[in-house]
Amino acid sequence: MNLAVHYTLVGVGLFSLGLYALIVHTHLLRKILAINVMGSGVFMMLVALAKRNGEAPPDPVPHALVITGIVVAVSATALGLSLMLKLNKETGSAELPEDQQE
Amino acid sequence: MNWNAWIPLLVVASSMLPGLIIFNLAEHRIRLRTALNLIGALVKLLLVGWMLWGVYNEHIFETRLALLPNLDIVLRAGPWSLFFVTLSTVLWLITTIYAIGYLEGSPHRSRFFGFFSVCVSATVGVALSGNLITFLLFYELLTLSTYPLVVHRGTEVARRAGQVYLNYTIFGGALLLLGTVWLYTLAGTLEFTPQGFLQTLDEAHHPALIAIFVLLVSGLGVKAALVPFHGWLPQAMVAPAPVSALLHAVAVVKAGVFGIVRVVYDIYGVDFASDLGVTDPLAWLAAITIIYGSLRALYQDDLKRMLAFSTVSQASYITLGVAIASPIATIGGAVHLLHQGLMKITLFFCAGNLAETLGIHMVSEMNGVGRRMPWTMAAFTIGAFGMIGVPPIAGFVSKWYLGLGALEIGKEWVVIVLAGSSLLNAAYFLPILHRVWFQEPTHPWPEERSFGNQETAWALLIPPILTALMALGAGVFATGSFSPLVWAQLIAQREFHQP
Amino acid sequence: MEVNWGVVLILLPLIGGIACFLYPRLVKILGVLTSFALVLSVAGLGWQIKINDIYRHSVGGWDAPLGIELYADGLSLLMLSATALVGLGISVYSVGYFDREDSSRFWPLWLFLIAALNALFLSADIFNLYVNLELMGLTAVTLAALTGSRDALSGSMRYLLATLLGSLVYLLGVALLYHGFGSMDIGILSVRVESSPVAWVALGLISTGLLLKTALFPLHFWLPAAHANAPAPVSALLSALVVKASFYILFRLWLKIFSPISEGVEMIFGLLGSMAILWGSLQALRQTRLKLLVAYSTVAQIGYLFLSFPLAISGVATAWSATAYLILSHALAKAAMFLAVGNILCFGVHDRIAGLDRVVQRLPLTASAFALAGISIMGLPPSGGFIGKWLLLEAALTKGRWDLVVVIILGGLMAAGYVFKVLGNAFTPSSEPHKSRPVPACMEWASLLLALGAILLGFFVSPVSSLLDMGSPFDISGVRP
């Protein structure tokens, strides 16, 4: 149980760090990284969930969810990166236009 | 197959379908468009005639379509509905002829006549409604279909007038909607029932019922040009004369007044409304409108604006007749619905003639026009005298009954209001008549168009003469067996005694 | 032979999308045929549901909790029909809208999006919903960026970040629900979930994530830029279908799982919904460009959907049907509106409202489409929007919620303000007349027919209601209090 709680807390921590970074940083690459970090946090929590019944084999359902989630995160990151590159080509900067005015 | 159940719907469709077809016609297909318009009008007239005969022989004409669970769309032919429907149908036919002549050579006629037809369908739907939700549906449809007619000319002035029109009517529609839904949640039904259906409700609901009455009458009062909701009417005069003639003097304003009639008689019931204490404030408001409208009319130089304020004033005669809870006043109010329609439309037709033929828009330009356009001005004179209340023209009959009804139940102040209003009417109409007939023109007409030996085109000349004669006839033959007056008496009977 | 319509609804657009990707020359034919086939498939599914009351299918023979189950009742059918009908309209429109190069990119993405939508509406467990939500989000973002302009790219970038954030928050909520109650299946959860801190946190997380994706005030910041800068058919599908999908999930989860344990959160929904209506309508009134006006109108209309939560949970069950009605009418009307605006843009190259040079006369079909769609948005009779508004008002008055009544009436008035702002200018000539380009007939007719659909919805309440009731989606009696 302790290990599972440990993982859960780390997961929550990662999620919060990612959320903070998403809101505060203006560079798009950082924002995309932040999303990935948040994703990792959620996946850690799911993995921790799988181990909650003590000595018995871990629950495979959350593991399946994590794998699916990773696939989705990879695709989303790819999309985000290509959008960022196109935006950089169009405007010469990798930040959203409104964020630049601050 | 019960054909009678479909007749009311057909009456609405008889102008809707030609309207939808007309939208798609190219501009130059004048004959087809005219044919469609006239066929639609004649079919409608026939159907209405059939309903009149049927109701006289105790047949029922009712179309019922489900809208929501427990709420139907109901179109029904009864005394009030037929009264209004006949007026609208006959006047639509005449106005169509007038409009064809008036708009000759103008752009966008297909669009105009398309919306014109939809508008009449909405008016007829309002007239034939059998419950408040059907009324609401056609009432809003009327707003939507008259807007394009107000902005028809496409100028900046027209757009702004249209905006004002919308501001008022959409706001009124929202109030009406709120009142209707609230009423439905309290009463569970919205069917128009002679002598009302709200008496059975618990006393605890009475404050809510009063609030609902205020909402409904305010919403309806916008179209009925009740002070302080009348502001849109003078502005809407920027529309072409046929639009002003039928819609704002007859159909739209009458729809609002008709709604107030329905609310007082067929939802609340006159006696219950009186008990709730809402009829007296309504009467005062109507009286204020009557005087205010006449006073504003005195100061207008623009002929159509003057007529608009006159309408504001005259429409409230009907409201006044409704708010004075007496059978004779009801007769006066009911019959004025018809009489005012005839007289006002005559006046607007004449105003349109003056504008189209001679470019006259202002009263000050009307000196001596009686010699140039005698027939038009004769019709105008009849209409004007009717407004003042000179016998034997129709206006006199309605004022007589209104006054009698007021005296009957001890509301003498109404008679003073009526007399005052007649004086004011005289004050602004008589000088015009004097100017028209007895003064020489001071300068040449602004923009004269020649029509050979006649004073103006046939299509512009016949309608006002026809409606003026009808106004005269309604007054002279008031005691005849099929006159509007007798009909109004039949209506009052149903409202005040057991059916 | 019983056709498995649910599987068809998912596979058909997937295959169509792949085919469009492989054969760029045939995209238009493939696209329209697929859309048409989808309408027929939805009808087939509807027929099946009518007979069996619900549709249930375990994909590959694997049952829950390991397998994926497809489930459809009246509400799912409503959403599927909306997707199919609006989808057909958008497809027909897009045949005329895109040039060859853009077409080869648009069609595969559009068909994949439809596949994701259909799969979403047929899902029966909360994780499958997540997967489809992501599929939908990614395709939608790409479609939004299609024009490649600076505004489109930044709008879709913000859309991507917002949608990913929303999904992650949602996923966290899903994880908590599984942790607390041991299942992903909505039916099983509806029985097991009971009031507890885990359930409340999960409710909060899931709702927040979905609110972000549905763009409810104040989480709507990404919507106007994304919807206004996309090509017209994409704007239509985003406003009409994509935001409704995340709302559908929220709706469904609340109906089945969260309503009994809500403890007042629905009041927050009512409050936010009211503010969305007022704020969105106000912003729409201030716009000088057509597409932004229509986008802010979407922000406002979404608010209406949330007004039913406090009403329904306090006992008026018809409020839920009001929501369903509003979803369908708004989908039709908003799609028609965006398509009409696309026509105006195509015609005159700009979308400044003040310069709408006599559009009524030169594009009568488009102007009618905008007017009819506007009637539904304003909630004037006769239209689907009016029915929804009537039902909401009835529910609010029955419960004495005068605050909601005032908001609904004000919303209608403001909607009239911005709709007629456009129509009024459409009658008058502008100060600088501009050269015009012809608009393909399929584009004008697509917008007009969708708008007519929104109006006709006002006349067919009874059939739609009985369709909705199949499978009793609104019956929460099987849920533990």
Image: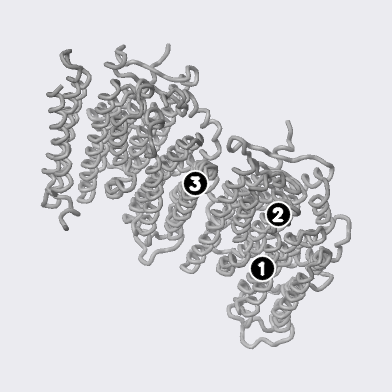
Residue, disc 2: B264
Kind of residue at badge 3: Arg
Q: Residue at x 66, y 81 (%)?
A: B366
- Chain label for disc 1: B
Nearest to viewer (mark 1 / mark 3): 3
Please identify the quadrant where the C terminus of chain C is shown: top left
**Disc number placed over residue B466 in the picture, else none:** none
Q: Which residue is mark 3?
A: C401
Question: Residue B100 in the image: x percent, y percent?
Answer: 63, 60
**B52 or A75: which is nearer to us?**
A75
Question: What is the x, y in percent for residue B377?
Answer: 72, 75
**Which mark identifies residue B311?**
1
Q: Assign a secondary structure to mark 3.
A: loop
Q: Is residue B3 left or right of residue C388?
A: right
Residue extending farthest to the right is B480
- Gap between marks 1 and 3 measured at Cα: 40 Å
- Can you say whether B404 is above or below C163 in the image? below
Q: CA distance from mark 2 to mark 3?
A: 28 Å
Secondary structure of the residue carrying numbered label 1: helix
Task: State the SS at label 2.
Answer: helix
- The reply to whether residue C111 is in sight is yes
Q: Is residue B33 visible?
A: no
